Amino acid sequence: QVQLVESGGGLVQPGGSLRLSCAASGSIFSINAMGWYRQAPGKQRELVAHITTAGSTDYADSVKGRFTISRDNAKNTVTLQINSLQPEDTAVYYCNALVLPTPIRTLEVWGQGTLVAVSS
């Protein structure tokens, strides 16, 4: 079994920063792509940032220049640095990973989510 555990959410004022972390644990042979999604109240879940094993990144247009995704392959972790937070960034943020528990099996795994609330 593979688990993703997020941390780092909270309440922050507009213009503030947060750092979200996600750690994978369990039976892991390797991890392919990792990413962060978010779901705001009444809206669909959307991709925020994505990073490949090699470190190539992609961002939603709404967060480019403010969010930075990074990963540590040795520790099976992915981090999202969030700067210049705006009220519209308020959402539950979910970590996602394509995990290979064995060389021939791939699982898509989700974290439990962490709330980011931006308000003055």
Image: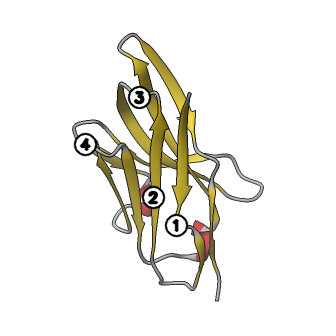
Q: Of the residues under marks 3 and 4, which one precedes in the sequence?
A: 3
Q: Residue sitting at 38 percent across and 69 percent down?
A: 66
> Quick check: 51 left or right of 26?
left
Q: Of the residues under marks 3 and 1, which one precedes in the sequence?
A: 1
* Front in this rendered view, residue 81 or 23: 23
User: How far apart are the alpha carbons under marks 4 and 2?
Assistant: 18 Å
Q: Residue sitting at 44 percent across and 22 percent down?
A: 101
* Front in this rendered view, residue 91 or 3: 3
Q: Quadrant of residue 28?
A: top left
Q: Of the residues under marks 3 and 2, which one precedes in the sequence?
A: 2
Q: Name the element at disc 4.
A: loop
Residue 21 tag number: 2
Q: Of the residues under marks 2 and 1, which one precedes in the sequence?
A: 1
Q: Is residue 117 above or below residue 77?
A: below
Q: Of the residues under marks 4 and 2, which one precedes in the sequence?
A: 2
Number of other residues with Cα within 10 Å of mark 2, as a class: few under 14, some 14 to 19, many 20 or more:
many
Q: Quadrant of residue 50?
A: top left
Number of other residues with Cα within 10 Å of mark 3, as a class: few under 14, some 14 to 19, many 20 or more:
some
